[in-house]
Image (cartoon, grey):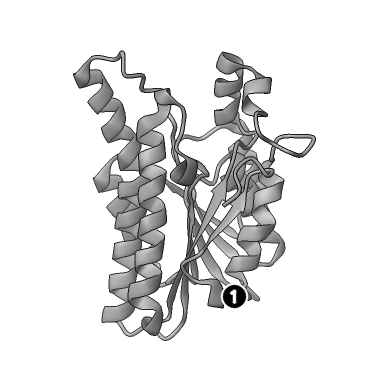
Amino acid sequence: MRNIKKTILVTGGSRGIGLAITKELLKKKNLIYLNYKSNTLQLSKFLKTNKSQIIPLKANLSLKKEVFRLVKKVLNDNNFPDVIINNAGIAPSAPVSFTSSKWVEQWDKTIDVNLKAPALICKSFIEQKINMKINKKLRIINISSRAAFRGETKDFIPYAASKGGLISLTKTIAKSFGKEGILSFSIAPGFVKTEMADEFINKYSLNHAMEGIVLDRLTEPKDVAPVVSFIASGKLDHATGSTIDINGGSYLR
C-alpha cells in the first residue's frame, strides 16, 4: 500500500454510482474501504484485481449494529479516512394504498439506509476526529437526489424525505464543524442509469425516466464519479455545505 494518496470510505460501492466512484478513485492511487451488502462473482473478481487498494467491508446498512461494525473496522485499522462517501441508498415503492403497517415498514427501511446510516457514520468519525485531535481534514460527500428539492412521485414519499434529510445533514455538518477541518458536500443526481433504476424503467418506461431531461441520454454513473473525485481532491473546499446538481437539466434551481 505504498504511495497511497488518501484513505476513502465508500458505502454501497459494489455497483452503480458507488462502483463508478470507486473506479475513479482507484485511478488516483487512493486506498478504498469499499462497503457492500452482498457479494457477486463480478464483485469478487473486481476486489481480487484491486486487492492492493481495496479493503472490502460487507455490511447491511439497514441494521444499526452493522453500521457500527463497519465504523469500528475502519477505526481499528488506525487508518482514519480522509474522505467519506455516503452513497448507499434504496428506493422501494411505497404507494399510499399500502396498509399503514406496510407503508411504515417501507418508510423505516428507507430512512434507515438513506439517512440514519449516513448520520451514524458521520457522527462516529466526526466524534473520533475531534476527541483524538486528528490533524487532517475530513471531507464528507453525501449522495442525495434531485428529489430532495423537487419532491418525487407519489409512490416514493419515503425516498424523497430521506434525501431531503441528507441535504440538511450535509449543511448542518458544514456549518457546525468547519473550524475543526470537517467539510461536507452533497451531490444531487437526477435519474441515473443503474441497476436500481432499471427496476423503475421496467415498471414505468424509459420515456417516463427521461421526462424533463434536456440532453440526449440518461445520466450515467460515469457522469457523477469525476465530480466526487474532484471534491475528494480538496480543490472545492470553499464550497463546503453546497449541493452539486447532476440531473441532465431536468431540475434547475
Q: Position of residue 126 (x, y in %)?
A: 33, 71
Image quadrant in which you'd find residue 181? bottom left
| Residue 160 in view, yes or no | yes
Furthest-front residue in view?
Answer: 253
Vertical placement of residue 47 versus 237, above or below: above
| Residue 73 in view, yes or no | no
Residue ID for mark 1 = 234
Q: Position of residue 167 (x, y in %)?
A: 42, 55
- Quick one: SS at disc 1? loop
Q: Nearer the viewer, residue 179 or 157?
A: 157
Furthest-right residue in view?
Answer: 216
Circle 1 Cα neighbour tier, 10 Å, few/some/many (<14 / 14–19 / ≥20) = some
Vertical placement of residue 151 versus 122, above or below: above
- Quarter placement of the N terminus: bottom right
Image quadrant in which you'd find residue 74? bottom left
- Looking at the rendered structure, the number of numbered marks drawn on it comes to 1
Q: Give the amino acid type for the residue marked by disc 1 in the picture.
A: Gly
Q: Position of residue 9 (x, y in %)?
A: 48, 59
**Residue 204 placement, left or right of 105:** right
**Residue 139 placement, left or right of 121:** right
Q: Nearer the viewer, residue 71 or 148?
A: 148
Residue drawn at x 29%, y 15% as measured from the top left: 98
Residue drawn at x 26%, y 80% as measured from the top left: 131
Residue drawn at x 64%, y 40% as measured from the top left: 250
Residue drawn at x 55%, y 22% as measured from the top left: 200
**Residue 68 placement, left or right of 5:** left
